[in-house]
Image (cartoon, rainbow, N blue to C red):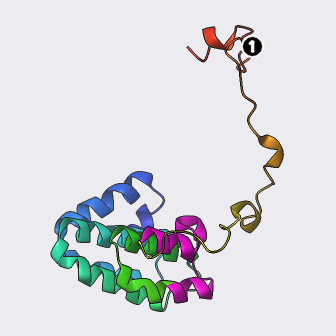
């Protein structure tokens, strides 16, 4: 059903919670689903979310879940960089510092959407393995082909200036209020 429901916002939020309640019994099936490349990428993201939820609800499963997600990232689906980003996010949530070597290899291979969690330095900082960057942060505008935003700096609106909503009333009496 994940393949059918992966486009439904409700399902992508609620199914991991429901499966998280099932706990240990759902781990094997979720792992098989994650490892089956015939399933849609977003459907497999539901499986990652459910595994993460199980680990949060049942701390005794955390090590197993970290291993499953790390094993997936050791040989990720080359056509699913977004799924890899989702898996990285789950490892960050689970504080999986022990997965850092796999994460470094994943990032060096380029098979991860850095829009999900940033670059490897961002991940290392989130995991508490470094305190500051040694390189400039990624330029998402350039990486994703977004138009430059330099000229769009927000102009400060004074309290007595006309409201930017176009009402003709002073800002302090309109949208500021």
Query: Which region shows up in magenta?
Result: 104-127
Residue at image coords 78%, 49%: 149
Q: Who is closer to the viewer here, 67 or 18? A: 67
- Is 21 inside the magenta-drawn segment? no
The residue furthest bottom is 75
Q: Who is closer to the viewer here, 7 or 98? A: 98
- Is 121 inside the magenta-drawn segment? yes
Residue at image coords 30%, 73%: 51
Pinpoint residue 139: horizontal percent, then vertical percent: 71, 64
Please name the residue that numbered disc 1 is placed on. 162
Classify residue 69 as left or right of residue 152: left
Pinpoint residue 60: horizontal percent, then vertical percent: 16, 77
Pinpoint residue 39: horizontal percent, then vertical percent: 46, 78
| Quadrant in which the C terminus appears | top right
> In this rendering, does residue 36 appear at all?
no
Q: Is residue 44 above or below residue 110?
A: above
């Amino acid at each position: 059903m994940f393949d059918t429901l992966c486009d439904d916002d409700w399902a992508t939020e609620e199914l991991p919670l429901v499966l998280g309640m099932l706990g240990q019994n759902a781990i094997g099936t979720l792992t098989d689903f994650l490892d089956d490349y015939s399933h849609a990428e977003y459907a497999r993201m539901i499986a990652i979310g459910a595994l993460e939820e199980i680990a949060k609800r049942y701390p005794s499963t955390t090590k197993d879940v970290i291993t499953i997600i790390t094993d997936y990232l050791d040989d990720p689906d080359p056509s699913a960089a977004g799924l890899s980003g989702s898996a990285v996010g789950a490892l960050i949530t689970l504080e999986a510092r022990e997965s850092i070597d796999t994460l470094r290899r994943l990032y060096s291979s380029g098979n991860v959407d850095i829009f999900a969690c940033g670059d490897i330095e961002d991940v290392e900082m989130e995991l508490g393995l470094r305190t500051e960057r040694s390189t400039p942060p990624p330029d998402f505008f350039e990486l994703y082909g977004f138009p430059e935003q330099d000229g769009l700096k927000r102009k400060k609106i004074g309290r007595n200036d006309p409201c930017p909503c176009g009402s003709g009333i002073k800002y302090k009496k309109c949208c500021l209020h």
